[in-house]
Every structure is written in structure tokens, then in C-alpha cells.
Amino acid sequence: MRTPSTGRMTGPRKGHAPGTAIGLVVCALAILSCGTFLQAQFQMPDPKQVSGIPRPVDDLPNGSLSVRLIKGELSNNIANHPVELHIGDRVQTVNTDEAGRAQFDNLPAGVTIKAVAVVDGERLESQEFPAPGQGGIRLMLVATDAEKERQKAAEAAAPAISGQVVISGESRIVIEPADESLSVYYLLDIVNGARAPVNPPAPFVFDMPKGMVGTAVLQGSSPLATNNGIHVTVLGPFPPGTTSVQVGGSLPVTSGSLDISQTFPAAFEQLVVVAKKEGEMKLTSPQFERQQETPVQGATVILAAGGALPAGHALSVTVSGLAHHSPVGRRVALSAAAFIVLAGVWAAWGPADPKSRSDERKRLIARRERLLQDLVRLENDRRRNRIDQPRYDSRREELFAALEHIYGALDSDETSPEPAGRTGLAA
């Protein structure tokens, strides 16, 4: 849902949590981090993004967990530091070795476990997860490098200069099928390589793909990022380092394929698209140089990569093999409803005896009541996230169109009485 003032997303939207999509990216990259495809195409994400996320591996004994403790960067291991493992109601403590790793063996399969460490007063916790029965688990706990953070703060306070920013190769475009729609997320790391804040020559603004609905800036983005409908703006100056901008929306699916075209105002250093595959879904793009599928947490994920994308050059991706419902049924239903309404209007205007007109009016009133009840149910479904935005908008438009015709027919015969307690919208 979004707060009205900023449009910033603060939780699940249309039944999909953005964190699920982002987690899918992290897990996919972590699983493939040792593969040749990933070495050629991807950089590892910010360690903070994978902190505390368990990763199944087969290079540890069955029922083992290895926790790596670092500060800020992968090269900065924290040695000889206690790491706690909460095993149900029990706590086991192991100190890290020179590589910053603490290993726990012979864990009871299926019991809920969580790794915890306190570094310079900062409490680090992993996700809770079941101990493995087969294979082992690796995870990292990443502490904040206070000195580096102070240095960043000092650089950010310097006067702004004119300069360029780029969209880092660690940025990701995520595609996730939903019910009759396609959720698209841009997880952008905008990098200012200078040691002072930078104002680009042109504003950093772009429009989401045509036809997208529910565009919102996701939680975890920089406060510099806002959106007005599909129009996304990132205000300068950009502080030194990385500015995270995560924005998403939904594209209605009305056929088996969907074309996505996107232009960014800064150079995209390396194109990476991650898509959750459902059914026969495929990705094609003239800008893809390599593509592969891999299983992640019980799902199949498509990983596609390309080279650099210059600023202002459109990225074109076709998503095919999408499940969709034919619009023919909906059109037939709308035509039938329109015919019934028009027949009612004709009957109200046409010559008829008083009894026939009274019966027709009662029928229209009953029809109106059913439509109003349908409208109430639709609004309740929306508040409870039981219906996605495209279906809600379409059904709401159908109901209001039918109600408009019925009210027109009823208003044309003002002398005919309505049943008591059934007047207008108050009914």
C-alpha cells in the first residue's frame, strides 16, 4: 500500500511483496556466485543485502551451518569473535576462525535456528530457518564499518559539483508473473564516483513502460526518489557512492506476449534481468548476450545478461509464453449486460400499462441493489488484497456503467413509487 503524500510503497501490493522479488534476486545470485555464467556477467551484490540470508550448499557435512562474520566488505573478516546459534530454546556459541567463519555441526534436522552476533554494540541476526537434514547452510552476518560510514558522511556534506552518474552493473531488472499481470521492478544502484555530491547536467527522470499501473517507489529506496504516476524523479545532488532506487509497477497481460520498452537517463553499466519463470514463459531481447535458467527455492528463475546500455537508448524485452484469459468472454458478458439494460430502458420509455411499468421498475430496482452489493464486495476484496489492480479497475468500470444506465431508466419515470427504504445510493 502507498502513503498518499509520497506514493512510496510501504508494504505488499496486489498480493506481491516487493521483498519477495528482491529476495529472489539475492538468492539467485548467491546460488550462482561460483558458476562461470555469473563470473562472466555479474558482480556480487552489496554484502548488506545478503546479510543473514541462509544459502543451502553441498560442500558442508549434513546438518552443518557455517556463519561468516565480516565488517562492511568481503575482505574484512572478523576473527576470534563469538557467534551465537539459537537452536530452539538452546544457545550454542562458537568463535570465528581467521577466515571469519564459525561452524556448527550435527544440528538436529528441522529444528528452527537463528545466528546472532554483536559487533561494536551492533546486534546482527540472521533469518530464522530450519536446520538442514541433507547438506549444509552458509550465511554471512555483515557489521557496519563505522569509520567508512563517517567518511561517507563527511564527503556527502561537501559542496555539490557538476558531474555524471551511472547505473551500476549491480542493478537488476526483476520480472514476476502475477494473475493477469506482470510485475516489473527496477532495483537501481545509481553511482556517483566523485568524492563530493554531484548534480548531473540533466535531471535524473524517466517514465515507466507504457500501460503500467500502480507504479510506486519501494521501501528501502533513497528519499531522493519519488514518482508521480509512471513518471519517476530522482532529485540531485547525488551523494558520493551509491544511491539506491527501487521502483515497481504492474503491466496488464491480455495476450500471450508482452513487449517492455524502457529508457534510462544514465548509462547502464551492465544489463541484468532476473525473471521468475511460470509455465512456458521466455525472455527475448536483442540486447541479451547470455541467458540461463536455474532453480531457486523451488522456483525456476531466468537470468539474462547483456553489455552496457548507453543513456537514452531503449531497452527492449519481449516476455512470451504468458498465461492469460481471453477477453472474448468479458466482452460477451458486457454486451449481454448492455442489452439487458437497454431493453429495460426501452421498456421504461415504451408504451405499457401502469402495472407493466411498475413491474419493470421493480426489476430495475432489484438489479440496482445487486450491482450495489457487487460494488461493496469488490471494494472489500480490494482492501483485503484479494484482487489485483487491473481486475479491480475493469470490474469497477463495468459496475458503474451498468448502474449509470439503471439510474437513467429509473430517473425517467419519477412518478412511479419506489419501495420504502430503497431510495438511491442509501439503499
Image (cartoon, rainbow, N blue to C red):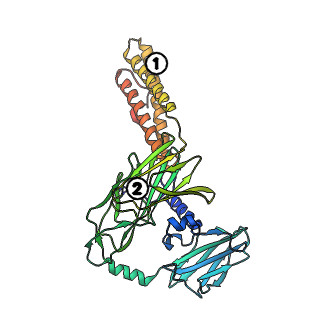
**Disc number lying in front (2 or 1):** 2
Q: Is residue 350 above or below residue 263?
A: above
Front position in the image: 418 or 352: 352
Front position in the image: 10 or 332: 332
Q: Which residue is mark 1?
A: 359
Sequence-wise first label, 2 or 1 = 2
Residue found 40% across the figure and 27% down from its top: 406
Q: Kindly identify the amino acid type of the residue bearing the numbered disc 2.
A: Ala
The N terminus - image quarter: bottom left
The answer to whether residue 5 is visible is no
What separation in Å lies between label 2 and label 1 (alpha carbons)? 49 Å
In the rendered structure, the answer to whether residue 104 lies left or right of residue 346 reads right
Residue found 54% across the figure and 49% down from its top: 282
Badge 1 density bin: few <14, some 14–19, many ≥20, Cα 10 Å: few
- Residue pushed farthest bottom? 80
Mark 2 falls on what kind of element? strand
| Quadrant hosting residue 39 | bottom right
Q: Which mark is residue 314?
A: none
State the image coordinates of residue 77 (x, y, percent, origin top left): 54, 83
Q: Which residue is mark 2?
A: 216
In the rendered structure, the answer to whether residue 368 lies left or right of residue 34 reads left
Mark 1 falls on what kind of element? helix
Q: Kindly identify the amino acid type of the residue bearing the numbered disc 1.
A: Asp
